[in-house]
Image (cartoon, rainbow, N blue to C red):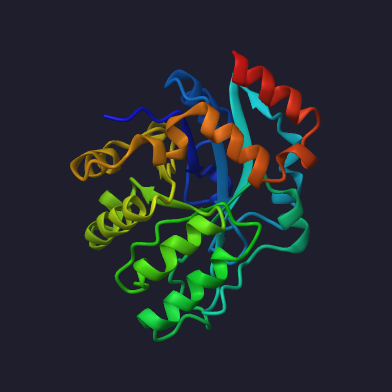
Amino acid sequence: MYTIIADLHTHTLASTHAYSTVQEMAVSAREKGLFALALTDHARTMPGAPGPWFFTSLHELPLVYQGVLLLAGMETNVLDFSGALDISDLERRRMDWVVASIHNLGLPGLENPTVEKCTQLWMRVAHDPVVNVIGHSGSPEFRYDYEAVIPEFGRYHKLVEINAHSFEARPANIPHCREIALCCKKYGVPIVVSSDAHFETSVKDHDAALEMLAEIDFPEALILNANKGRLLEYLRRHTNILQNRKNADAILRSMENA
């Protein structure tokens, strides 16, 4: 079985359908031996999402808290088949970590999905420089051409999420999650395994996803958040963390050598 060192898709009570504070989530991460935790509350079009100052003020939180690397993040909604996201220009500059995902909220823009439309959607998200993670993209309703899109995710340094919460909350997604993982394995595209935790006890709850990955003999080397060095290299090369966070380079180096 794999060892996951970072949970990179989690929610706090700021999302209003999640129920733990930042402190509670960080303490849980520390107690479970995690190196890093990304706080990725929902952006503005999700019902109950936090107000407009929430994300641009996240850097009030320390980069290291409770001994855990704490990433200021967001789960942004894909709004339409052009790949538009509900993230402002200022938020784009301020975020350490961005997960892009589809939530079928009944809003105009994603009506009558087809494989062709969804393939176009994810191709455009693949080219969006702010996005780090493609979140729980295994919905059968929004199925896309994995063979065409997943190599593009790899070319543009998008990490494909295997979301453990989907195995409980979105059972129709499970066979598609497996197909996506097999396609990532085939093309050597890195993934992240995430809990999508909405309460502190679910932090690092990755078992269902890890069991599926073990069944298909998924390479550990392609799981970005199974290795501290891989995660830190990605943060340095493909995020804004060095530019946005005071003393970030020194902090990352000290944590790397700890």
Q: Is residue 93 above or below residue 244?
A: below
Image x and y of residue 165, in percent = 34, 48
The residue located at (26%, 29%) in the rendering is 1
Q: Is residue 232 left or right of residue 200?
A: right
Q: Quadrant of residue 197?
A: top left
Q: Nearer the viewer, residue 249 or 35?
A: 249
Image x and y of residue 219, in percent = 32, 39
Image x and y of residue 250, in percent = 75, 23
Q: Residue furthest bottom?
A: 112
Q: Is residue 255 left or right of residue 81?
A: right
Image x and y of residue 98, in percent = 59, 52
Q: Is residue 54 shown to the viewer in this render?
A: no
Q: Is residue 82 shown to the viewer in this render?
A: yes
Quadrant for the C terminus, please.
Answer: top right
Q: Is residue 51 left or right of residue 228?
A: right
Give the total of numbered labels: 0
Q: Nearer the viewer, residue 166 or 138?
A: 138
Q: Is residue 103 above or below residue 181?
A: below
The residue located at (63%, 54%) in the rendering is 50
Q: Nearer the viewer, residue 199 or 55?
A: 55
Q: Residue furthest left?
A: 215
Q: Is residue 176 above or below residue 199?
A: below
Q: Is residue 78 above or below residue 251?
A: below
Q: Nearer the viewer, residue 188 or 175?
A: 188
Q: Is residue 257 left or right of residue 113?
A: right
Q: Residue furthest top?
A: 258
